[in-house]
Amino acid sequence: MTLDPNDYTIQELGPELKDIEDVSELEDILQREHRGENRQGAIALIESRIEKFSEDEEADDEGGVELAGMSVADVGNAVRSIDEIGELEDLLEQEEGGEDRDSVKRLIRQRIDSVQGSDEDEDAAGEEEEAQTPEERHPDLDHPTADKQHVRALEDGTYRDMWVYCEVQQGELIDVSFEMLGKARELMDEYNEEYDADERVVAVVMDDDAERLAEQTIEYGADVAVYVEDDRLDRFRHKPFTEIFCDAARGPGHPYGREDREEEEWRDYDEPRYTVFPATNNGRDLSALVQAELDSGLASDCSDLYITSAVISNPAKTGQPGTNRTFERVLHMKRPDFSGFEYSTILCLDKPDREFHPQGASVIPGSFELPDPDPEREGEVVEHEMPMDDEWFGVEVTEFDQLDGGVDLSGNDVVVALGRGIGDDPTRGIELGLDLVDAFDEADLGLSRGVITASYEFDGHVEGYVAEERQIGESGQVVEPDVYIAVGISGAVQHKVGMDESDLIISINTNPDADIVGFSDYFIEGDLFEVLPELTRAVESGELDVAALADGGRADD
């Protein structure tokens, strides 16, 4: 029986695929994923297996490649292993005389260019054994930054553990810190089982009451809690927090670390293997600064993480054009891409002459479940001692005001979210949304980013509801209510990550092809200004029948 990938999380799927080598079976599994949850991470996993074993089958195919009937993806896999220009040109001629698909011809031409480029690279490598510096390549040019000091990545570094920056606000760890610890615990447990390793979750806490908070992180999954406690750390500041994190991350003997750094009993490596930060205002700043200082990459605003291998053909990473390389223990960092309609999975991979560690990510708050604390759990709490320069604290906050309250949409049974569809009459749209909210017992009003950033004019009695704190999505709140009602929202990925874990999703839109229809349980096609009053009356009368309002049809019918 063919494995159904939709029965497994992405983390569980990797081990299940490990023993499957039949390309036809893998392609069937891929189609099941496309028809089911259609997760980009799962698709990448399955496609990497297909790519790996397709080459063996193609090598045994003495009759050559027959393009007729092959999908574009199949053609891409087939031509990837062909290194003969003549054979590729024959395939191009075959396609031009057959189905003549532009996408297929483009794939073949790209492969021809790649093979031709690899020949040129080999010729160049024979002529020049060592890479030249910019100064050597261009001696006639002035290089004003030649004396600039720059911290470089390690060579043959030793990397272990997953480090989690636990953010503190108003003297307490915030929820996303616990969410990340729970996810890190899950990832490293699976990692240790998969690779027969014993690597740990390391929490990092900086505050004026850091020791108490560090002990708390053990309850939520940390094996080791590294803390720095100082009265001056009561408020986030870029310079000291970056310096402290990087100093702690660099082990004794690190070429860019402190010379007076003593050996540490709890660790025996140069830098963390992985780093995870919250995608809060402070966390976004710190993650970028730390990863830059450690000379590595960062995937920001991630909504999922998993660790598995990756098969890569990019010559910049493999070091040899036309070949594949398998990278192990890769942190796959899933985030909405810049198109707004798809997810991308970001990988931070070494180059042949360049190491990229730690592999770093920042995580959107609410992306992972809040774990239950275990007061009996044991771990090691380590105080990190280091000198701190007074100049790091050159900026001092002498006075501040704190807003009372705020809007927390996460605790409601129902969330009514309004989008750009209210644009014909913005004030009336807000009024209708509030009427529907009032019809429920535990409900509140949310907004898409489109409403927040639009230049709509609202009457004074509703203007206070149009606030950024009500925004739902990647750069706003993440909610998981029993019922989510999306009104006049197109469903871009940035919004989807903020609400797609809701138990029941109802969307109202005039466009049946809107993206949100694809992940709604019920879709009501109609003008929100007509549908909302009817929906409100149905809720108030206790006779709500969503299926009837949706004309009896679910969104996936």
Image (cartoon, rainbow, N blue to C red):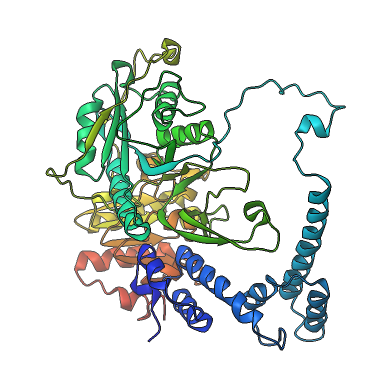
Task: Report x, y in % for residue 321.
Answer: 71, 59
The percent coordinates of residue 41 (x first, y second) are 46, 63
Q: Nearer the viewer, residue 304 or 13?
A: 13
- Quadrant where the N terminus sits is bottom left
Q: Foreground residue, 277 or 408?
A: 277
| Residue at 81% over, 60% down | 119
Does 472 sit above or below residue 193? Answer: above
- Residue 524 place in picture, x, y as percent: 40, 71
In percent of the image, x 32 and y 59: which residue is there?
Answer: 193
Quadrant containing the C terminus in the rendered view = bottom left
Query: Residue 85 is drawn in which quadrant?
Result: bottom right
- Identify the residue shown where x is 29% and y is 45%: 181
Q: Position of residue 446 (x, y in %)?
A: 36, 50
Q: Is residue 513 visible?
A: no
Nearer to us in this view, 199 or 6: 199
* Quadrant assignment, res 326: bottom right
